[in-house]
Image (cartoon, rainbow, N blue to C red):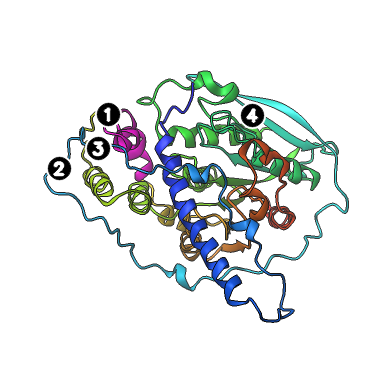
Amino acid sequence: MNNPRGLKHIVLVQCCIVALALAGLSASVLAQTKSSQGTTKKSTGKQPSNKATKPTPATTAAPAQAPTTSATTAPAQAAPRVIEEPATAGGTIQSASLPTRSLKRPKQALKFIAEERRLSTTTGSLWGTLLIPTNASTTASVPIVLIINTSTVYNRDGISTLYRDSSSTLKFLAEALAAEGIASLRYDTRGVGKSQSAFVNESYHDFNRSVTDACGWIDSLRKDKRLGALTVIGFGRPSDFGREGGLAGIVTAARQRADGLICIGTDSRRWLRYIRGQVAKAYPEETAKEIDSVAALMEQGQSPQVKKGSGIIYDLMRPTLQKYILSLNQYEPITEIAKLSMPIVIIHGTLDYSVADIHARNLAAANPRAKYYSIKNMTFNLKEGAKDLTTTPSEKWKVPIMPEVVNLFADSIWEIEKQ
């Protein structure tokens, strides 16, 4: 089963936004280059690389024309296109300095083994991989992270056959942490990889089921006597229906009283407001207005009729998806993260153009225990932008995770204590 939530237009929206951001960055760098011609370069550090500003083949595939929306049953009056965000304290939040090396980290890389794990559900089995250091004992001494995956197009390793994307981000992260003495579990969500048969249909599934699955994995991990403090990693990918991996991490950590939480690429808005803002940036005004109209009705608790053949509106908000959307939209990430009492790490890369850093800062401002880290030149794949953004999808497995990102994860996780 491919792309069960119909993410084609979600990805195109993100590609449009990334392409626009990269084009702006390229123009800025070009202007700086021209203005500096004929002058002597000052030794003030490394000059910006032109490689980091070249769009990948995927980002240049954005639609030139908006899909037709004439088949949609629209309300009499369209909602305004400009989405005004409420004022938050995020603007005052500054990136924290990277932590000093934890004394608990091993002095040299450890060996590790992989164990296949199975989680039984009422509709079938979910499958995952537990990576654990070979020196693990039965004294609950090994910290464990659950890497939450909500993507229906990327498997547990961070590979997508649909998009021919070999990034392998989740596998690389798990292996790097295992070498640091930290165990991890990553898994195929319903409809992907070995968990494909656990997916029923679009109407059956909702966001709460994704959270329930994550909670089930935590229950399973807590039975393993080798494992100690548990940290949830919510990984929000642009290919998610609404970057909900980060939100799923927040909600799961709250329900299971995890010992720590790490959020990556997480938006701070409810889903309907998020998608209205994203589409407004990427599509023509008339299309954006029509999506606003449908989204505004759903925000009021209504179920608007969206006809098949109406392009992006049908792809985003067709009747079979509205249950999932409404279950996702009931959570406001800022409100949910404010409820937590555990250590929280919020990470954003300066080259993650699909979500603005203000949303990471908004989340950090909502909870006094949260630390916000802005990683220079990092993409949403946790990789260095000059390489990640200029590498074709099939070759992305050759690009490693940034070492400073691995250090940040390892130092943060080792300092989280079991409650």
Measured in 3D between alpha carbons, the distance from the residue under mark 4 to the one under mark 2, in whole angstroms, is 45 Å
The amino acid pointed to by label 3 is: Thr
For mark 3, give the secondary structure.
loop
For mark 2, give the secondary structure.
loop
The residue labelled by disc 3 is: 69
| Mark 2 vs 3: CB contact within 8 A | no
**Picture residue at 35% right of the left edge, 44% below the top:** 329
Measured in 3D between alpha carbons, the distance from the residue under mark 1 to the one under mark 3, in whole angstroms, is 8 Å
Which range is magenta? 308-329
The residue labelled by disc 4 is: 128
In the figure, 415 relative to 42: above or below?
A: above
The amino acid pointed to by label 2 is: Pro
| Mark closest to the chain's N terminus, 4 or 3 | 3
Image coords of residue 147 (percent x, y)? 61, 41
In the figure, 205 relative to 415: above or below?
A: above
- Left or right of 20? Residue 186 is right
Quadrant hosting residue 137: top right
- Left or right of 49? Residue 305 is left
- Mark 2 neighbour class, 10 Å CA radius: few under 14, some 14 to 19, many 20 or more: some
The amino acid pointed to by label 1 is: Gly
| Mark 4 vs 2: CB contact within 8 A | no
| Mark 2 vs 1: CB contact within 8 A | no
| Mark closest to the chain's N terminus, 2 or 3 | 3
Judge whether residue 365 is colored magenta: no
| Image mark for residue 75 | 2
> Can the viewer see residue 360 in this picture?
yes
Quadrant hosting residue 64: top left
- Left or right of 56? Residue 329 is left
Measured in 3D between alpha carbons, the distance from the residue under mark 2 to the one under mark 3, in whole angstroms, is 13 Å
| Mark closest to the chain's N terminus, 4 or 2 | 2
For mark 1, give the secondary structure.
loop
| Mark closest to the chain's N terminus, 2 or 1 | 2
